[in-house]
């Protein structure tokens, strides 16, 4: 039997070690189950809430070439965190005689496996939606307290040890001058780097 590994992590804050760990465990699963690995597809910093993942799409397309029989994922949530996408893409793979298996979740082939897989996929989607709500709530609270939420620091500010915005004494006069000139009719500078 020929297989491919699909590995993914969703955040720029995650590290390459996550991919390495997934590949190590997926490879061990393949060796234990007599599967020859013929390819690897890796999406870095792509969420499984969407199917807009380049390597995922390439893997789905490649399945039509009949070059592999199984896709090995570390957990089902690496494949998708959206039940609709999961069902749709698994159906496409099945048409190409390819099935998806989890290296770490023991899902039987029988009727009970259908229920377990459904529960695991539902829990993955729930986790993703719940996490998004918590992150949004946390970012709102940070904003209400004038705390830094990440990203690019606005020109003329610095972030203190408690993650609050503070006026940058070096650059603030430049920002004030830019706004004064703009209010007086001068065009904004082309570059924002000062």
Image: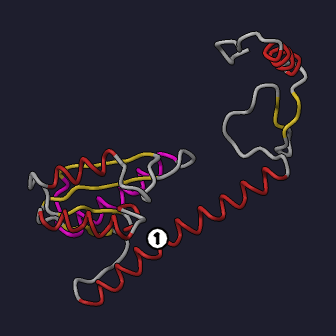
Q: Is residue 16 magenta?
A: yes
Q: Name the quadrant of the C terminus.
A: top right
Q: Name the quadrant of the N terminus.
A: bottom left
Residue designated by label 1: 124
**Residue 181 location, x and y as percent?**
82, 12
- Which of 169/6 is in front? 169
Q: Residue at x 23, y 63 (%)?
A: 31
Magenta stretch, main secondary structure, is helix
Secondary element at image label 1: helix
- Which of 183/107 is in front? 183
**Residue 131 location, x and y as percent?**
59, 64
Q: Residue at x 24, y 68 (%)?
A: 32
**Residue 179 location, x and y as percent?**
82, 19
Query: Which span of residues is magenta-colored?
Result: 15-37
Q: Is residue 53 magenta?
A: no
Left or right relative to 74: residue 65: left
């Amino acid at each position: 039997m020929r297989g491919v590994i699909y590995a993914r992590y969703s955040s720029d804050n995650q590290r390459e070690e996550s991919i390495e760990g997934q590949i190590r465990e997926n490879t061990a699963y393949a060796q234990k189950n007599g599967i020859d690995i013929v390819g690897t597809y890796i999406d870095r910093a792509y969420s499984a809430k969407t199917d807009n993942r380049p390597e995922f799409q390439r893997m789905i397309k490649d399945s039509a070439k009949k070059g592999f029989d199984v896709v090995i994922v570390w957990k089902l949530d690496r494949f998708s965190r959206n039940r609709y996408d999961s069902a749709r893409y698994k159906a496409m793979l099945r048409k190409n005689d390819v099935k998806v298996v989890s290296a770490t979740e023991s899902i039987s082939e029988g009727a009970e496996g259908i229920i377990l897989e459904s529960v695991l996929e539902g829990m993955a989607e729930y986790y993703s939606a719940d996490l998004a709500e918590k992150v949004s709530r946390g970012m709102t609270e940070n904003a209400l307290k004038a705390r830094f939420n990440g990203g690019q620091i606005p020109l003329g500010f610095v972030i203190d040890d408690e993650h609050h915005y503070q006026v940058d004494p070096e650059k603030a006069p430049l920002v004030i001058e830019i706004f004064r000139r703009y209010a007086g009719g001068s065009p904004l500078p082309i570059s924002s780097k000062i």
